[in-house]
Amino acid sequence: MRVRLGAAALVFTLVAAGAPGTGLAQAGRAPVAPPRTLLRGAALVLTMDPALGEGELGLLRGADVLLDGGRIARVGRGLDPAGARVIDVAGRIVMPGLVDAHNHLWQSLIRGCGAGQDVNGWLGQCVFPLFGFRFTRADAYAAVRLAALDLVSSGVTTTVEWAAGFGPEYVRGSLQALDDSGLRFAFSYFGSADPAVIGDIRLVKATLVDPNPRASLQIGGQPSPFPPFLDDLVASSRLAKDLGVKLHVHLLENVAQRQEGQVQVLELAGAIAPNLLAAHAIHLTDGEIDALGRNGVGALHCPLSNMRLASGVMRLARLRQAGVELGLGLDGGTNDTSDPFNNLRAAVGLQRATSLDPGAFPGVSEALRLATVGGARALGLSGEIGSLTPGKKADVVVLDPRAPNFAPLFGEVSQIVFNAQPANVEWVFVDGRALKERGRLVGVQEARIIEAAQEVSDRVRRLVTP
Ligand SMILES: [Zn+2]
């Protein structure tokens, strides 16, 4: 119950501050026991567990999925419905919730900004001016709450918020929004050598993250050779190891960053280790890729962002060959949408377009694995999520393909990658609790959340040229 007490205190603060559109009715979710739910008679279940069904996706046709106590209880045909809420999913596709391994939810405020920029131009135009903005809790809440809603609606059940260094109030508003969203999440708190920041990271972990079974902490870092970033990275790497959490950096996203010797900076900071997550990891040499693989580093592919910012194309096949764990990420405002299906299409298409090989990794099945079990493994959460293996958390989505953009069912697995849209996401469960039900988000006032984000965005826009 400690989490509820902490959350309640934060709720009180937000209400007292007159936070706009907070949707705080959601904060009461945790104390209710997760319901027992039977998803009955799916056209296709992608268990993502080869031991449960056919092929590497563990496919089962005409099967049921039983959710109980917040976990997957059973998967199979003709399961006993006793004591369960039975949901008829005939004609539907059931699969694990999608894992978004790298995002910046606060950037919902700056969607569409810097459309003709590369990452450095985009940061200069759209992000750096915001260090003069002074985010309140309510501001951060409004931004993150909107993006979280978009993620849930799109079939994402786990996200990673790589948070900018906008200060403790921003951190708390973001965490409250993530908690209220019902999503499973990792919060990547931007690290520093400053003892006050380190103290706050420890405090946030102990009071707001660890007591929340849906939350985990990461430390965010920047592999730059310039002060104060190098000192910050050294301290962050040390702290991440001390806390037993991931260190999450952006690595060689733009080719100009090769001049910064980012891999060498990570080596210098002692950061190339199994707890390192590297977003983008595009402009790496073969030797650097092998070093990442040898050291158990995870790399997170954000293809829509890479396309928008003219960043380049990640060498996915080479990274996989080197043994690097791979996941997919949506990457915030440089993607603009939270659509994981667009991301899947881009992950498949970019490799084909650059290799001229329709058999290039990842194929459609491999891309679906990256978006589920792959991301879960990279985040160190594969014991709990990523597949519909009994005993794992009941993070499940139901797609309804009976729509003009998706029907008829013909090559279902390929259609998830090539046809699916967020509008086809009919049900979303996290810990067995429905966050989206028959195509509608549960228990939220969408208009208020949108309005609140627009109000903050209007103030941000005075500092930023779109
Ligand atoms: Zn990013």
Image (spheres, rainbow, N blue to C red):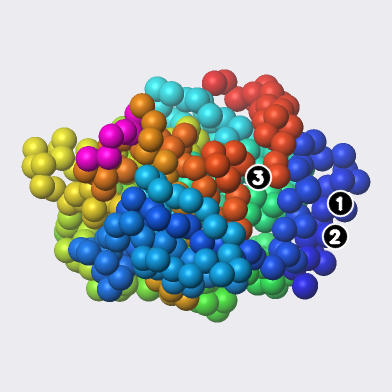
Residue 9 bears which disc, if any?
2
Q: Residue at x 39, y 31 (%)?
A: 403
- Left or right, 403 with reference to 141: left
Q: Amino acid at mark 2?
A: Ala
Q: Residue at x 77, y 72 (%)?
A: 2
Residue that mark 3 sits on: 442
Circle 2 SS class: helix
Say if mark 2 contacts mark 1, CB within 8 Å. Answer: yes
Q: Amino acid at mark 1?
A: Thr
Q: Amino acid at mark 3?
A: Val
Q: Check disc 1: other Cα within 10 Å, few if <14, some if 14-19, many if 20+.
A: some
Q: Is 408 a magenta residue? A: yes
Circle 1 SS class: helix
Q: Position of residue 435 (x, y in %)?
A: 60, 50
Q: Check disc 3: other Cα within 10 Å, few if <14, some if 14-19, many if 20+.
A: some
Decide whether the magenta segment is chiefly helix, strand or loop: loop
Residue that mark 1 sits on: 13
Looking at the image, the residue that sits furthest to the right is: 16
